[in-house]
Image (cartoon, rainbow, N blue to C red):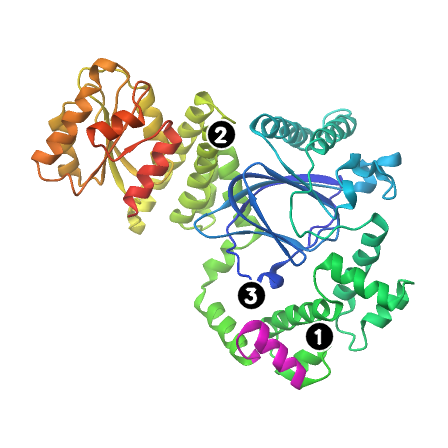
Amino acid sequence: MIESSETGIFNKLFSCETEYSEKRAFLKLEENELFEIALIGSGSGIHRVLDKDIPCKKGDMFIIPPNIPHKYFVEGSSKELIIRRLFWSGQEWLRGEFANGASNRFCYGVFRENATLGYASLNTHIFEKVCVFLDMIESEISTQEDEWRGFVSGILSSLLITVSRYINSSIKDLSFASCEDWKIISNAIRIIREEYADADLSLETVAERLYVSRSHFSRLFSRIAGKHFSDYLRDVRLKNVCKLLEKSDDNVDDVARKCGFNSMTSFYKCFGSKMNMTPNEYRRTKSKCQNDSDEYTKLLKGEKIMGILNDISENLQRGKSKVVKELVQQALDEGIKPQDILEQGLLEGMGIIGEKFKSNEVFVPEVLVAARAMNMGAQILKPYLAEAGVRSTGKVCIGTVQGDLHDIGKNLVKMMMEGKGLEVVDLGTDVAPETFVQEAINQNCQVICCSALLTTTMPMMEQVIKAAEDAGIRDKVKIMIGGAPVSQEFCDKIGADCYTVDAASAADAAAAFCNE
């Protein structure tokens, strides 16, 4: 649970890697004591709110009031979900009618039509505008210069007003409620989560405490929470049973009673139905996982270690080469494995830059300084990676075709590919077709990348393909082409395997080929 910060406002970039499981999602839901603005920056997945599964993708934005259980998950082929999250206290940052839940202008109207949460699907222009607002707020929070609170208040208001214009109710099957109705259910959820261990807790006792009739409360809870009161109470109790089974040595019956279950027959039936195993099987499974993890894994989950890796990623994105170099050395000194520094620090940051480049959030200068920062950090890591036997995820040779001396685009693609963890052999410019093929053979490359800026040199790409066929490696190597005059039509015509419109997409395609 996220509680109020000292300033009542803070933000973070969140990379979600938790895979969605319909059976177990209820165990992972979290609730915050602050308002949350969440902007999906890249990827796709599921936003679970109470008992509702909401598909989400880049450009989706959610505004979530306090104390609503929810969580983000990745699903299917999506490997990650990048989310920008801003948490803020309504009591500290809202005033007047905008702070009054009964007002139509509460929170600048983002909870219109009595919606439990605000949702908007932003176009590219508004997405970029929202990112600018979030960047400004982040800068003010971090520096806290004179009158920073007044400045942030103005930007937050502008952000909410902007988003409120695009709020829609296109999320199907999401329960809606008036502000007063939601207050009742929000309080009920709080009571359940705080007092689940009380075996006498029931729909009747909670309704009486909230001064509403039993029948009205029952209908209201089912409509807003998406499940019956008894089912929700059972799930909360089961979630806490699982926690105790993992952390304590108490016998199963005692654990069940501590979590509010009176009937052991009912408890075992509920647990088996929900978890597809007995409580003892669940405990053995978790115990085995914990025993299999070494002290390093526990260390890696610590806030200090994750903080260093996040700092590496964030400073790399800002192009702060010197800071990245120092942080990489600090991470090594702290005992973090070189591969984790590479993957969760350097490659994580470069991957985010790549996604921003594809969506036109950053441009070539930002990519170049980020790549320079990554190279500085990678140089510190190289001897440690070699000692640990860490290998690249694939090998690519790249060059500008014969007759063409341009290399800016080629160099950008190379940086992006290295940011994906690929080993890249740079052949330079004016590269003959035979050289591409021979180096691919000598270096055992899985991919050949050909770049051209001049229309007069484009035919040399076809010669590279023919040279690969003559050498008998065409079925063993993928050939990618790119450059300003190149098109998908030309790619299809000459029989190349892939054409991409930008450097980031080229890196994604090369990584995919190497992982086939």
Location of mark 3 (residue) = 23
Within-10-Å neighbours for mark 2: few <14, some 14–19, many 20+? some
Task: From the top left corner, tell me how far across and down residue 434 is, in percent.
Answer: 11, 28
Secondary structure of residue under mark 1 = loop
Q: Amino acid at mark 3?
A: Lys
Left or right of residue 347, residue 45 in this image: right
* Dot 1 or dot 3, earlier in sequence: 3
Q: Quick check: can you spot residue 426?
A: no
Task: Indicate which label's residue lies in the foreground, 1 or 3.
Answer: 3
Q: Is residue 166 above or below residue 26?
A: above
- Residue shown at 79%/51% (left/top)? 177
Residue 271 in the magenta stretch? The answer is yes
Task: From the top left corner, tell me how far across and down residue 256 is, in percent.
Answer: 67, 79
Location of mark 1 (residue) = 259
Classify residue 437 by image quadrant. top left
Q: Amino acid at mark 2?
A: Ser
Task: Indicate which label's residue lies in the foreground, 1 or 2.
Answer: 2
| Marks 2 and 3, how far apart at CA | 34 Å
Which region shows up in magenta? 265-279
* Dot 1 or dot 2, earlier in sequence: 1
Task: From the top left corner, tell me how far across and down residue 394 is, in percent.
Answer: 28, 43
Task: From the top left corner, tell me how far across and down residue 272 is, in percent.
Answer: 57, 78
Q: Is residue 192 above or below residue 312?
A: below
Q: Is residue 272 above or below residue 495?
A: below
Left or right of residue 295, residue 150 in this image: right
Q: Quick check: can you spot residue 265?
A: yes
**Figure disc tally:** 3
| Marks 1 and 2, how far apart at CA | 48 Å
Q: Amino acid at mark 1?
A: Cys
Disc number at residue 359? 2
Secondary structure of residue under mark 2 = loop
| Marks 1 and 3, how far apart at CA | 20 Å
